[in-house]
Amino acid sequence: IVDRGGVLMIFGDFGQPENAKYELIFLVLSIVSHAPTITAFSLHSISSLKEHRKSLISNRSLRMTNQMLEIFHLQLKGVILHVFIPVLIFVMVNLLDTRLLFSDAIHASIRFVSTMLFITNPFQFSLVYIVKTSRYRKLATRIRSDWVGRNSHTNASDPTLPACSDSHR
């Protein structure tokens, strides 16, 4: 990646963006048009949950409301890490000439890290639900143990594979 020659994150040499400027304009316009609605709905949901939490009598209802607020906060942190920061890096590095600030190796590292963060965005949303909800956590554990148990039995019945003692299962 370092020897490739371009200094912009995605589109090649600085000052020659070709069609990329239209893609960048479209990206910024879509963020500007969608972000306020999503932000307003999220803030309204959080404020509604906080108001609802004040009137709860049952400990179970209070715990569930607190858990939903915690999930909202985790998702917000995930969006900041996996969407906002990578898109901000892509936009800033495409708008500003950073050849004097960073070496080629640092450009390659920034491109790699921000791309990996952006690619893993869908995974973090589902992981929040699995990690924070005990029912899904138990289901994931059961599926994993069933899968491991099924695979260990098939390995034991296959004479071509090495045998595994019970202490390693």
Image (cartoon, rainbow, N blue to C red):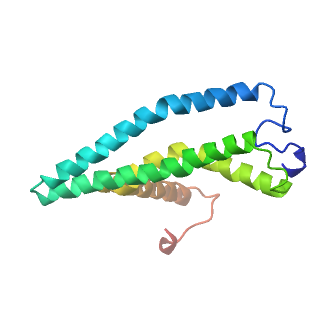
Q: Is residue 55 visible?
A: yes
Report the side of 57 relative to 128 (left or right).
left
Please provide percent x and percent y for residue 57: 9, 56
| Point 47% across, 35% down: residue | 35
Nearer to us in this view, 81 or 28: 28
Nearer to us in this view, 88 or 142: 88
Q: Residue furthest bottom?
A: 167
Q: Residue furthest left?
A: 57
Report the side of 70 relative to 100 (left or right).
left
Please provide percent x and percent y for residue 77: 47, 53
Instruction: Please tell me in which quadrant of the rendered image residue 63 appears.
Output: bottom left
Report the side of 70 relative to 118 (left or right).
left
| Point 56% across, 45% down: residue | 84
Asked if residue 143 is positioned above or below residue 96 in the image, the reply reads below
Q: Is residue 143 visible?
A: no
Asked if residue 39 is positioned above or below residue 69 in the image, the reply reads above
| Point 67% across, 40% down: residue | 91
| Point 58% across, 66% down: residue | 163
Report the side of 24 relative to 145 (left or right).
right
Please provide percent x and percent y for residue 132: 35, 56
Number of marks drawn? 0
Please provide percent x and percent y for residue 16: 85, 31
Nearer to us in this view, 140 or 125: 125
